[in-house]
Amino acid sequence: MPTSLVVVGSIAFDTLETPSGHADDELGGSATYFSHSASYLAPKVRLVGVVGKDFPKRHIEEFEERGIDVAGIRVVPNGKTFRWHGRYDRKDLDNAQTVSIELNVFGKFAPKIPRGFQNAGYVFLANGSPQTQRTVLDQIEKPKFVLADTMNFWIETEHKALLELLPEVDGLILNNAELLQLSAQPNVVAGARWALAQGPKVVIVKKGEHGAMLFTGEEFFAVPSYPLERIVDPTGAGDSFAGGFMGHLARAGAVTFDEMKRALVHGTVMASFTVEDFGLRRLIGLKSEEIERRVSEFVRMITVDLGTVSVR
Amino acid sequence: MPTSLVVVGSIAFDTLETPSGHADDELGGSATYFSHSASYLAPKVRLVGVVGKDFPKRHIEEFEERGIDVAGIRVVPNGKTFRWHGRYDRKDLDNAQTVSIELNVFGKFAPKIPRGFQNAGYVFLANGSPQTQRTVLDQIEKPKFVLADTMNFWIETEHKALLELLPEVDGLILNNAELLQLSAQPNVVAGARWALAQGPKVVIVKKGEHGAMLFTGEEFFAVPSYPLERIVDPTGAGDSFAGGFMGHLARAGAVTFDEMKRALVHGTVMASFTVEDFGLRRLIGLKSEEIERRVSEFVRMITVDLGTVSVR
């Protein structure tokens, strides 16, 4: 199925502390947020990840209820699932502080793409070592569009491997601070131009509460974030964003600039749902009508027509 | 003339240090940036400010060449013009550090609105003491739309006077950090709602490189900033933005939500020109065609249509 969407990344249990409260053992992980988010849009989402024997069957069933193919989830019999404990400061909801991290089975994650996943049209390489991300590409047959995420840790520790990965992917998605760090440029526009010169045809910059930007060699598009009066838990916003973006592209079946613009809108809306509650609570069980309504509302919020005035 | 636009604020000489270089004795000040910016859009801009005898006739002529009414500029015979020395860090072009400040004649600025200015339809109270801003309102006959700017200094030192001013103005414009400080709310959306409850019908939030937001009781609109690869000098961006905003409203002659959206676009574009060079160098001598072209280009950059896809 050429329009299937494969995601490779983490599945985790999160302990979350935000200004709105506290949550323990929340289902989390980049591939989890991504696949649930994308499942509302993409024809078929296939998940590749690893969990321990402590991972409840209930969460596997939740994936399946959303039509997500779980054949790529490996369960390590003697292992424990990846755990992350994060904390957000009231003044900076866009950046989590890691209180503790237990990589557990994710520490030795060597993704094996099931045979039935190898003809995926769309691939999301969630945040991970660029070398691991590269091994995924070697197992996929001629994908239509590959998007890679990364983060400051890999920019610092595997800079060379990351630079070598860039020509192999179609799109790079990262946040604005990471782009400045990776590019050593003074601003996001210059940073995006630098990144495009390394190979990707598209660079997507996530700016949290300040929205997102899309750069290609020729074109530019930007959106604000969806305005929310209360953000309960920012965890997973970036992966939900990527899920909405890739989910839309897989659904559209074409990677034109117009579809990427629409994809950016869908990413923004999916992320806005995620942050309204802890973990995946808001995302799981969302109704299609809620998504459609918010997409329309958001497009209305960012649309302006110039009318007939003229400059003096 | 009911569509005339009066601005009351500072006229200054600036010493500017930015990552792009250094400039001495640049013409500056909030009312200067505002009036030059608005002059490209508004039918008639009238400036109220104060300078010393050191203020060159050349700058007065520059105002006049743009059709700006300078009858409200008072020249203090034995005084010196306001001077500001600002520095920008490479990592934070949105916030200037004040190296030194000499208020000079601006320290005792008690704006006197000339009789011919008193029937202004549109009024911009540039950043200043809320008490001084209030004295301006007392001298204007039934304006159509009054927009007030403020800053952290007044929020800290004249909090009560500022809160008392808010019910007297139609719009409040400030940056995101200032809005959080003023409102003591956790985010901009909640902060804007708080501010609207104090009286203004519109709150405009300037976010520098992250664009701008417009809130009314019922509606919301947001734009990113115009993407620039090189920002030479951020000084005056906010006042140029306000000039584009109010200039458009005065030209439109109607304060509808649609016109305010267009005004936000024009503010964004005018600010984008200002930051391309030191001081007012780029703004003065701008061509109407350049503005029209960038406005169209910018609207294209932020426009998306949803096409015919649907949520699964």
Image: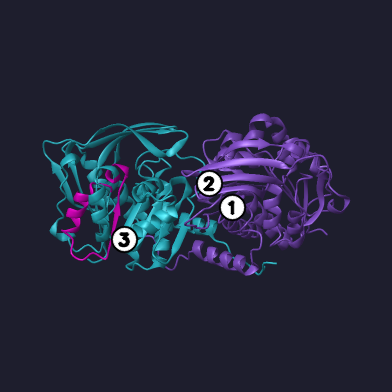
Chain colours: A cyan, B purple
Residue extending farthest left:
A77
The structure residue drawn at horizontal position 51% and vertical position 50%, both measured from the top left corner, is B20
- Of A251 and A110, nearer the camera is A110
Q: Is residue B28 visible?
A: yes
Q: Specify whether B143 is left or right of A166.
A: right
Report the Cα–Cα distance between label 1 and label 2: 9 Å
User: Where does residue A28 sit, x and y in percent of width and height?
Assistant: 30, 41
Sort mark 2 into few (<14), some (14-19) or many (20+) by Cα contacts within 10 Å: many
Task: Please provide the residue range marked out in magenta.
Answer: A127-155
Q: Amino acid at mark 3?
A: Pro
Task: Say whether residue A148 is magenta.
Answer: yes
Residue A289 in sight: no
Which residue is nearer to you in this view: B312 or B279? B279
Quadrant where the N terminus of chain B sits is bottom right
The residue carrying pointer 3 sits among few (fewer than 14), some (14 to 19) or many (20 or more) residues within 10 Å by Cα, namely many
User: Is B233 rendered above or below residue B159?
Assistant: below
User: Do the residues indicated by labels 1 and 2 lie within the same chain of the protein?
Assistant: yes
Q: Of tags 1 and 3, which is closer to the observer? A: 1
- Label 3, on which residue? A200
Residue shown at 69%/56% (left/top)? B36
CA separation in Å, label 1 and label 3: 34 Å
Tag 3 subunit: A
Q: Judging from the image, what secondary structure is the residue with disc 2 in?
A: strand
Left or right: residue B44 compared with residue B264: right
SS class, disc 3: loop
